[in-house]
Amino acid sequence: MALDQSFVGRTYPPTEPYEVGREKIREFAEAVGDAHPAYTDAEAAKALGHPDVIAPPTFVFSVTFRAAGQVIADPQLGLDYSRVVHGDQKFAYSRPVRAGDRLSVTSSIEAIKSMAGNDILDIRGEVHDEAGEHVVTTWIKLVARAAEGA
């Protein structure tokens, strides 16, 4: 079943704040194999002008994908998540994510397309800190594969 095109432009409420912890940053940096000292050593981060350790650029995906769950779970949209694969992601930063940040995400549907029986859903996430400062804009592309035989 094709996704409802009228959802393009729909914006969902901001998420509750996600508090970014030093340990989560360290675990993520280790998991992706990035040994940059600014991700694990507060003094190294301060030497680069940051108030605390910063997160690798793709760390915010774990926060924004959770927020995109509002879109994914919307029963009116008609997305069959069992058929979804991750297609792409992009980030446009105003500043790095830092330990201690409390981030909220507002998700919006930017586009819905159909191609070869597959539905392609573009979700934009606007990430702000507790003071309302813009941190990063993210884009997630999800592909809902066509049902077999469709």
Image (spheres, rainbow, N blue to C red):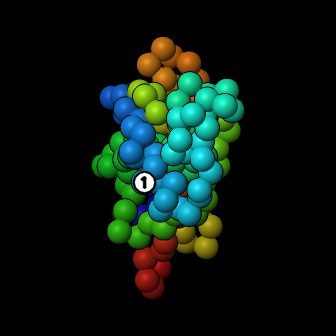
- Frontmost residue, 60 versus 37: 37
Q: Is 99 placed above or below 77 here?
A: above
Residue 85 locus on image (x, y percent): 48, 67
* Residue 111 in sight: no
What is the residue that sits farthest to the front in this orientation? 43
Q: Secondary structure at mark 1?
A: helix
Q: Quadrant of the N terminus?
A: bottom left
Identify the residue under disc 1.
27
Q: Quadrant of residue 88?
A: bottom right
- Frontmost residue, 118 versus 95: 95
Q: Quadrant of residue 49?
A: top right
Residue 3 locus on image (x, y percent): 46, 55
Residue 18 locus on image (x, y percent): 37, 33
- Residue under the image location 33 percent in, 46 percent down: 74
- Residue under the image location 41 percent in, 36 percent down: 20
Position of 95 with respect to 73 (left or right) is right
- Residue under the image location 66 percent in, 31 percent down: 47
Kind of residue sitting beneath label 1:
Glu
Q: Quadrant of residue 147?
A: bottom left
What is the residue that sits farthest to the bottom in this orientation? 149
Position of 120 with respect to 67 (left or right) is right
